Amino acid sequence: MSDNVRHKRVLITGCSSGFGLLTAVEAARAGYDVVATMRNLGKADYLRQALDQADATAAIKRLDVTDRDSIEAVAQEYRPVDILINNAGILTMGSFLDITDDEMRTVFETNYFGVVALTRAVVGGMIENGSGLVINIASLAGLIGHIFNAAYSASKHALVGFSKSIRQELKPFNINVVSVEPGYHKTEIIRANANVSENFYDQDSPMLQYNRGFLRLMRDEIIPRAGEAQDVVKIIMKIMAAEKPRAHYVIGKDARFATTMQWLGLTCALEKKIHTKLLAATRRESRRTEDRKAKRKKPPANQ
């Protein structure tokens, strides 16, 4: 462990699972002074177990990025922070026609406004120290959009724009700002922690069959092909150790493919490919639904 690492304090949000948990463990094992935070400390057992297995230690604190008092309390207790990793995020799936205003605001409060508030609270100490690093975990969705996840995609677009803007503002203070943009990876945000909108299954919605088709597409093709979360964590660790990190990192085969298509001016071809897959998945889900209905209507064989 170098002295440089030993004396660096890292504050990470969203550490109950996924990138946050894995990064907290890897950073603690590497010797960083880790403050691992999460909204619900009732979910901290997985992190504690992972730290024990890695023979590493970290401070585990409650931090709700939508609660300004919570932000201020943690920011003051652990001032100054050398590296801030804004990882906490939520996903609410469903067509923009079906997601409610409240649901969309909740996504933005966590994925965007919470990041802004915490960064404001922490960056003052970095300015005083004359150095710092802010890593914002955005998403491929923040670069190219994401069907049936308009709220999530829009919040990540905002986060990418925020990162680009403050990178220039904080440069005179020797503070680096990095945007990390992963494609699909096997984390709980696309599994147990994924939410569907309140009106996702509204029988009157013109998007009902496509909402269901998108879930089928996720289950059949997207989740099975998702990358390993540890691949993203390795990049985050490299960013933390780099003297001059890049402005942003696109991570994952799907992310690199999609952004290359966009760079080549082939966005329409990419959208057509996605649309074709969605229609195929919608047809599969519709057949499954009809088969289930038929089985329920079929009388028992002994009648």
Image (cartoon, rainbow, N blue to C red):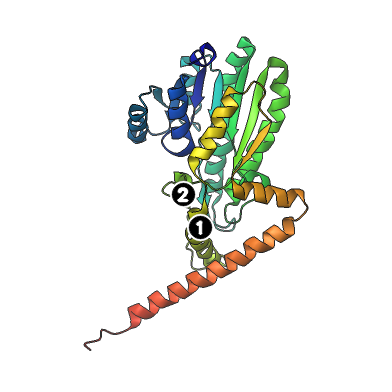
SS under mark 1: helix
* Quarter assignment of residue 244: top right
**Residue type of the residue flagged with mark 1:** Met
Which sits in the foreground, 124 or 146? 146
Q: Earlier in the sequence, mark 1 or mark 2?
A: 2
Q: Crowdedness of circle 1 by 10 Å Cα count: few (<14), some, many (20+)?
A: some
Of badges 1 and 2, the one in the foreground is 1
**Residue located 54% across and 43% down the image:** 107
Q: Where residue 59 sits: x, y (%)?
A: 40, 21
Q: In this view, does 278 lie above or below 226?
A: below
In this rendering, position of residue 208 left or right of residue 144? left
Q: Where residue 53 sits: x, y (%)?
A: 34, 30
Q: In this view, does 184 lie above or below 76?
A: below
Which sits in the foreground, 116 or 288? 288
**Residue located 63% across and 67% down the image:** 276
Task: Pick out the residue farthest to the right.
Answer: 265
* Quarter assignment of residue 46: top left
Q: Where residue 257 sits: x, y (%)?
A: 66, 50
SS under mark 2: loop
**Residue located 68% across and 59% down the image:** 271
Which numbered marker is on residue 218?
Answer: 1
The residues tagged by marks 1 and 2 sit, at their Cα atoms, a distance apart of 11 Å
Which sits in the foreground, 267 or 253? 253
* Quarter assignment of residue 301: bottom left
Q: Where residue 101 sits: x, y (%)?
A: 56, 49
Which numbered marker is on residue 73?
Answer: none
In this rendering, position of residue 154 left or right of residue 295? right
Residue 132 makes an appearance in the image = yes
Which numbered marker is on residue 194?
Answer: 2
Task: Pick out the residue farthest to the front.
Answer: 1
**Residue type of the residue flagged with mark 2:** Ala
